C-alpha cells in the first residue's frame, strides 16, 4: 500500500500544497519563496528518502512568518495522513548529525501525542538570508501539532547559524525516516501496548 499524504491549505495569508510519499527515493520539488527554507525542506526530503512536493504562495510582502508557519502546518498534516494506521512501523527513531562545528540530536516517537522539546545554542545569528532563525522552533512546533508526534531536538553546540539549523533538519529527516519505516518483524502489528497510536 502506498503511504502518500496530500494537503492543500488556503487562508487569506497563504496558499499551500504539500505532497509526501514516505516510501519514496528523496525526490523533491520545493518552492516557498524563502530560499533558505526551501533548502531545509529539500534536506528533509532527501535525507528522509521522502518524495516531497511543497508549493507555497504567501504574503511575503509582509514578512516570511505566515509562509513558513503555514507550510509547516501543512507538512505535519500530510505526514500524519501518509502514516495511515501506523501498523507495522518502527514508531521510534533517532539520529545524531554533525555539520562541521555543529551537532544535532533528534529523537521522535510517532505516538499520536504532540510534544516538543527543543534546545539550541544561545546567541545564534538572527537571520539567514530572509529566514528568521527564531522560526526553526516554530516550524517544529507547527509540524508536531499537526503530525501528532513527540519530538526532541537538541543542538548542544554550534557557532554558524546555517550549520545549526541545517543539521537539525537533516537529523529530523533521518529520525522520521527510521520511525516511519516498516518493521519486517512486526508486519500487521501496531507498535503500542495501548492498542492505539
Image (cartoon, grey):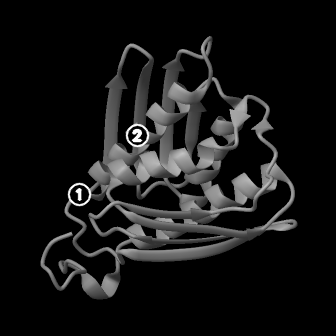
To which residue does mark 1 refer?
84
- The crowding category of the residue bearing disc 1, from other C-alpha atoms within 10 Å (few below 14, some 14 to 19, many at least 20), is few
Mark 1 or mark 2, earlier in chain = 2
Helix, strand or loop at disc 2? helix
Left or right side of 29 for 167: right
Question: In which quadrant will I find the N terminus?
Answer: bottom left
Q: Which residue is drawn at 46% across and 50% down?
A: 141
Q: Using the image, determine if residue 169 lies above or below residue 13.
A: below
Residue 3 appears in view: no
Residue 11, numbered label: none
Q: Using the image, determine if residue 146 lies above or below residue 97.
A: above
Q: Which residue is drawn at 34% across and 60% down?
A: 114
In front of the other: 48 or 117: 117
Residue 118 in the image: state x and y as whole percent.
56, 62
Residue 88 in the image: state x and y as whole percent.
26, 75
Helix, strand or loop at disc 1? loop
- The crowding category of the residue bearing disc 2, from other C-alpha atoms within 10 Å (few below 14, some 14 to 19, many at least 20), is many
Residue 73, numbered label: 2
Left or right side of 78 for 155: right
Amino acid at each position: 500500500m502506498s503511504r502518500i499524504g496530500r494537503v492543500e491549505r488556503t487562508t487569506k495569508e497563504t496558499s499551500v500544497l504539500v505532497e509526501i510519499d514516505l516510501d519514496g527515493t528523496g525526490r523533491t520539488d520545493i518552492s516557498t519563496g524563502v530560499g533558505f527554507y526551501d533548502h531545509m525542506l529539500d534536506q528533509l526530503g532527501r535525507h528522509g528518502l521522502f518524495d516531497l512536493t511543497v508549493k507555497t504562495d504567501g504574503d511575503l510582502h509582509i514578512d516570511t512568518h505566515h509562509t513558513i508557519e503555514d507550510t509547516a502546518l501543512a507538512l505535519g498534516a500530510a505526514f500524519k495522513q501518509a502514516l495511515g494506521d501506523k501498523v507495522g512501523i518502527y514508531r521510534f527513531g533517532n539520529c545524531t548529525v554533525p555539520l562541521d562545528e555543529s551537532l544535532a540530536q533528534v529523537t521522535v516517537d510517532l505516538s499520536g501525542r504532540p510534544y516538543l522539546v527543543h534546545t539550541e545554542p544561545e546567541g545564534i545569528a538572527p537571520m539567514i538570508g530572509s529566514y528568521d532563525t527564531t522560526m526553526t522552533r516554530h516550524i517544529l512546533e507547527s509540524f508536531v501539532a499537526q503530525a501528532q508526534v513527540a519530538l526532541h531536538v537538541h543542538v548542544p553546540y554550534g557557532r554558524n547559524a546555517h550549520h545549526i539549523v541545517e543539521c537539525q533538519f537533516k537529523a529530523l529527516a533521518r529520525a522520521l525516516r527510521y520511525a516511519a519505516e516498516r518493521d519486517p518483524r512486526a508486519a500487521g502489528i501496531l507498535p503500542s501496548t495501548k492498542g492505539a497510536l
